Each structure stands twice: as structure tokens, then as C-alpha cells.
């Protein structure tokens, strides 16, 4: 993806990988040495008045959109601060991309430099100043599931929001209405994400010796591995009479794995004609999800070969 994006420039752009950008110049946060706190931008490309920040997310959970994404905008502001001594005001556009290979998801968004800097000055800086002063209002919401908030484990407002079920304590009617079910689905996503975070936090506390009343850390079933690796174990097993056919598995490679190995161009020219797209199963998603609405009939006929 990065190579493809670099080729969209008329001239080779400046490229920086795994670069720490000073987000603290906007938020006011500092490291122990007093320097601005930072975040790591996986790739920064600059050329033709465009500063392009790409973030690689390896997780296979929830697709993350780059559109108006606060983390990406902070990375953009940090990158502007870092490279302004070299480019001055020649940068007029900040482009942001989030790549999630495990979900086959690539999301792009862009904003003018002036708009981004105004957001940093008028929105982020005042809110960050209140937060650093221990003031401001805790406002739980969908953003709490993105795992960026450092106090999400112990946030009282988030706990109250996740656990509040007052609207479902009615005795009548006996069955939930469609709107109530919609509310359960929305709240359930926040509840399960919050509960998972609290479990992780509790385990860390117990392992650190601080303890959580009524809970303990236990060792789950381990796995068995070859001592010294297969290269060390297999010759000895073969010498002892174990058939080599029992030591190895042969299975076909998947189309995505082969595309990764040979490259997109070779895949498109040689391999793709032998690949059939199998429709995925229907899954529940909020209306804000960018995927098209599932069509049972279209999905059924999509699996049929062309005549």
C-alpha cells in the first residue's frame, strides 16, 4: 500500500518510517525529561504540498476509519510541527490513511492544513489543558472502545454508562420493543469492550502484587513445542524410526497468502482468474458502518460461476 501511495506523486516523495511525532506540542503532555509527549507514525510521506500520514493496525477486531479520526489528526499535527522547519508553509493538505491488513481495510481522509491547525488550537489544546488540570467532564461514548484512553479501566463515568440499565427495568411491556433492542445492542458493545479492558487491568494489578479482592491469577494450559525447534528434533525422530511423512503436513496455500508472496501485479495477471470470491456470512452492524447492506439474494447468486 505504501509503495502504491508513493507512486501517486509525480516526483518521489520524502518518506520517513516509524517516526515519533511531538503530539505534546498540541496537548501539553510531556515526557519525564520535559520534552513533548509523542506518538509513532508508521509512515510519513511529503510531496507536492501534501503531508501523508499512514498508520498500520495489525489487530483483527473492529475496522477503524481515518475519517475525522482524532488520533490521526494528532499525528498530522505532530508531523507538521516536526517537518515545518524544512517545508515551511508549503504543505497545504494533510492526508491520513489507516491500513488494517487483517480486515482487508484501507481508509483514507484528508483535511487542509489550516483546518487541522485550527482544530488543534481551538478544540484539542483547551480540552487537554482541562484534562491535565484534573478538570473537565468525563464523557463516555463509542470512542471508549478504541483503547486509547489511559483511564478507561477505572473511569467512573464509563462504568456508570456501561452498567446503567434503568431503561430496561420496566415491568411492562413484557417484551422489549425494537427501539429497546437497538439500545441494548448499542450499550452492549460499550459494556463488552469495557469489561474486557477491566479484566486486563485487574490481571495486571494482580501480577504486579496489588491484588483485586476475590480474584487471583492462574496458569492456563500451556502448549507443547519441539525442544530446540523442529530442525533439532526431527533428525533424531527419523533416526528412531518415525516416518518422515508423519512429521510434515502439506496443505494448499490460500489466495491472500499467495498474493502476499508473489505481489499484486502477478496475482492479478496469473492467479486471480483461478480464484472465486466466496460471499461472507451476514453480520450485525450499526447503520454508520460503511459496508453495504447485506442482500441475501445477491449474495446467493454471487457464488454461482459465470456461464
Image (cartoon, rainbow, N blue to C red):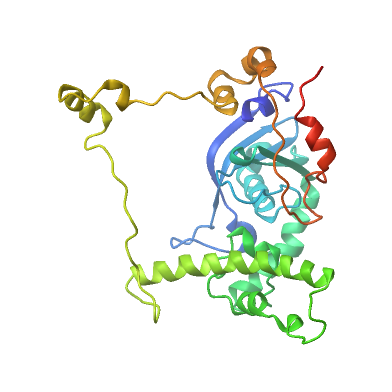
Q: Which residue is drawn at 50% across and 23% down?
A: 252
Residue 81, given in percent of the width and then of the height, sits at 64, 48
* Furthest residue toward bottom: 171
Q: In which quarter of the image is the C terminus?
A: top right
Residue 281, given in percent of the width and then of the height, sits at 70, 43
Q: Is residue 135 visible?
A: no
Q: Can residue 278 be seen in this view?
A: yes
Q: Residue at x 60, y 37 (%)?
A: 101
Residue 243, given in percent of the width and then of the height, sits at 25, 22
Q: Quadrant of the N terminus?
A: top right
Instruction: State the residue in front, 151 or 118.
Output: 151
Residue 24, given in percent of the width and then of the height, sits at 58, 58
Looking at the image, residue 194 lies above or below residue 7: below
* Furthest residue toward top: 270
Q: Quadrant of residue 143?
A: bottom right
In the displayed structure image, the side of residue 149 where residue 287 appears, left or right: right
In the displayed structure image, the side of residue 239 where residue 100 appears, left or right: right
Q: Quadrant of residue 232?
A: top left
Looking at the image, residue 15 lies above or below residue 38: above
Instruction: State the residue in front, 187 or 12.
Output: 187
How many numbered callouts?
Answer: 0
Q: Residue at x 46, y 68 (%)?
A: 201
Instruction: State the residue in front, 297 or 119.
Output: 297
Looking at the image, residue 111 lies above or below residue 46: below
Amino acid at each position: 500500500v505504501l509503495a502504491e501511495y508513493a507512486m501517486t506523486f509525480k516526483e518521489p516523495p520524502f518518506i520517513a518510517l516509524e517516526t515519533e511525532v511531538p503530539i505534546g506540542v498540541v496537548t501539553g503532555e510531556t515526557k519525564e525529561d520535559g520534552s513533548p509527549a509523542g506518538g509513532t507514525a508508521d509512515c510519513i510521506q511529503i510531496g507536492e504540498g501534501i503531508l501523508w500520514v499512514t498508520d498500520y493496525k495489525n489487530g483483527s477486531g473492529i475496522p477503524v476509519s481515518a475519517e475525522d479520526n482524532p488520533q490521526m489528526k494528532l499525528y498530522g499535527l505532530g508531523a507538521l510541527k516536526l517537518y515545518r522547519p524544512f517545508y515551511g508553509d508549503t504543505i497545504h493538505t494533510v492526508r491520513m490513511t489507516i491500513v488494517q491488513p487483517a480486515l482487508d481495510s484501507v481508509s483514507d481522509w484528508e483535511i487542509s492544513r489550516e483546518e487541522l491547525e485550527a482544530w488543534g488550537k481551538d478544540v484539542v489544546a483547551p480540552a487537554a489543558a482541562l484534562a491535565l488540570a484534573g478538570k473537565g467532564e468525563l464523557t463516555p461514548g463509542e470512542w471508549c472502545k478504541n483503547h486509547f484512553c489511559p483511564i478507561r479501566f477505572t473511569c467512573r463515568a464509563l462504568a456508570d454508562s456501561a452498567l446503567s440499565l434503568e431503561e430496561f427495568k420496566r415491568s411492562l411491556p413484557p417484551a422489549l420493543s425494537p427501539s429497546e433492542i437497538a439500545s441494548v445492542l448499542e450499550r452492549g458493545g460499550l459494556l463488552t469492550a469495557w469489561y474486557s479492558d477491566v479484566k486486563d487491568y485487574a490481571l495486571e494489578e494482580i501480577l504486579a502484587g496489588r491484588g483485586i479482592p476475590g480474584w487471583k491469577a492462574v496458569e492456563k494450559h500451556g502448549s507443547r513445542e519441539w525442544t530446540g525447534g523442529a530442525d533439532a528434533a526431527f533428525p533424531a525422530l527419523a533416526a528412531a524410526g518415525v516416518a518422515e511423512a508423519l512429521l510434515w503436513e502439506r496443505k494448499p496455500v490460500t489466495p491472500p497468502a499467495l498474493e502476499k508472496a508473489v505481489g499484486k501485479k502477478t496475482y492479478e495477471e496469473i492467479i486471480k482468474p483461478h480464484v472465486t470470491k466466496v460471499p461472507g456470512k451476514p453480520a450485525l452492524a450499526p447503520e454508520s458502518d460503511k459496508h453495504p447492506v447485506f442482500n441475501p439474494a445477491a449474495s446467493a447468486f454471487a457464488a454461482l460461476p459465470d456461464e
